[in-house]
Amino acid sequence: MNRQSVVTLAGAGLLLMCSPLVVAQQVGSIRGMVYDKDFEAPLPLAQITVAETGAKVEGTEQGNYVIENLPPAPIR
């Protein structure tokens, strides 16, 4: 193998090793609390759905929720 082939293979290997890192960074999460304004209290066990993806979670007894592994999207 000549020097140019070794350099090319090393560069290709480096790119392949870095590509999972790029893919892994292309997700996000949403976290928050569902709050009942009328009763001024957290709303326990609420069902939260992301309309664009259909992702669903159930909130905690304290009204908190986290939806993970969401693709990047603009906030509306």
Image (cartoon, rainbow, N blue to C red):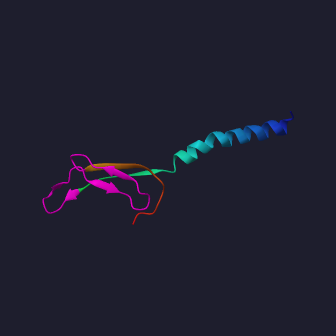
Q: What range is drawn magenta here?
A: 35-63
Relative placement, left or right, of 17 versus 36 is right
Q: Residue at x 32, y 55 (%)?
A: 48
Residue at x 36% of width, y 52% of height:
56
Which of these two is toward me, 5 or 35? 35
Residue drawn at (73%, 41%) of the image: 11
Residue lying farthest bottom? 76
The image quadrant of residue 17 is top right
Q: Specify whether residue 76 is painted magenta.
A: no
Majority secondary structure of magenta residues: loop
Q: Is residue 50 magenta?
A: yes
Q: Is residue 12 left or right of residue 26?
A: right
Q: x and y percent of residue 25 in the render?
A: 51, 47
Q: Residue at x 21, y 46 (%)?
A: 61
Quarter placement of the N terminus: top right
Q: Position of residue 53 (x, y in %)?
A: 44, 58
Residue that lies at the very extreme toward the right in this rendered image:
2
What is the total number of numbered labels drawn onto the structure image? 0
- Left or right of 3: which side holds 31? left
Q: In the visual, does 42 lie left or right of 31?
A: left
Q: In the current view of this chain or complex, which residue is farthest to the left?
A: 39
In the depicted structure, whether residue 48 falls above or below residue 15: below
Nearer to us in this view, 54 or 29: 54
Which quadrant would the C terminus be assigned to in this image?
A: bottom left
Return the x and y of residue 59 as percentages of the image width and height: 27, 49
Residue at the far top in the pictured view: 1
